[in-house]
Image: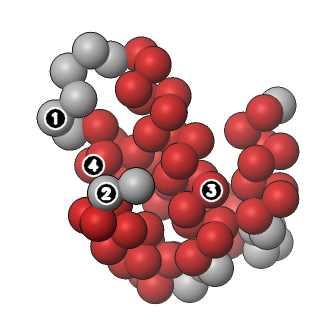
Amino acid sequence: MPVGDEATIAALAEETRTDEAVGQALYAQELAALEAEFSIKNFIGVIAARRVKQRLARHQHTRPVSPRAARRSHAA
């Protein structure tokens, strides 16, 4: 994972008060989905970060997300 992506994940984790492993798992899922869907890769990291932030915001109102739950929710 590029260094810029690691910084993005760290910022997401801090902003959403989520474990960094959860953010990394969700970010990797979103990145893979976007890379498979789009041929132009310029802003995929930005879009993936926004999607992770939205997913984490939904879970903040319910219960904490564990890395394992993050992987399962994407598989469903």
What residue do we see at 46% from left, 47% from top?
A: 51
Residue 15 located left or right of residue 55: left
Report the residue marked by disc 1: 42
In front: mark 2 or mark 3?
2
Report the residue marked by disc 2: 2
Amino acid at dot 1: Asn
Residue 74 located left or right of residue 50: right
Q: Which mark is residue 25?
A: 3
Q: Nearer the viewer, residue 52 or 28?
A: 28
Q: Secondary structure at mark 1?
A: loop
Amino acid at dot 4: Val
Report the residue marked by disc 4: 46
Residue 12 sits above or below residue 54 on the image? below
Query: Nearer the N terminus, badge 2 or badge 3?
Result: 2
In front: mark 4 or mark 3?
3
Query: Nearer the N terminus, badge 1 or badge 2?
Result: 2
Is the residue under label 2 in contact with that under label 1 (CB below 8 Å)? Answer: no
Q: Which mark is residue 28?
A: none
In front: mark 1 or mark 4?
1
Amino acid at dot 2: Pro
Count of marks placed on residues: 4
Q: Nearer the viewer, residue 3 or 25?
A: 3
Q: Secondary structure at mark 3?
A: helix
Residue 9 sits above or below residue 38 on the image? below
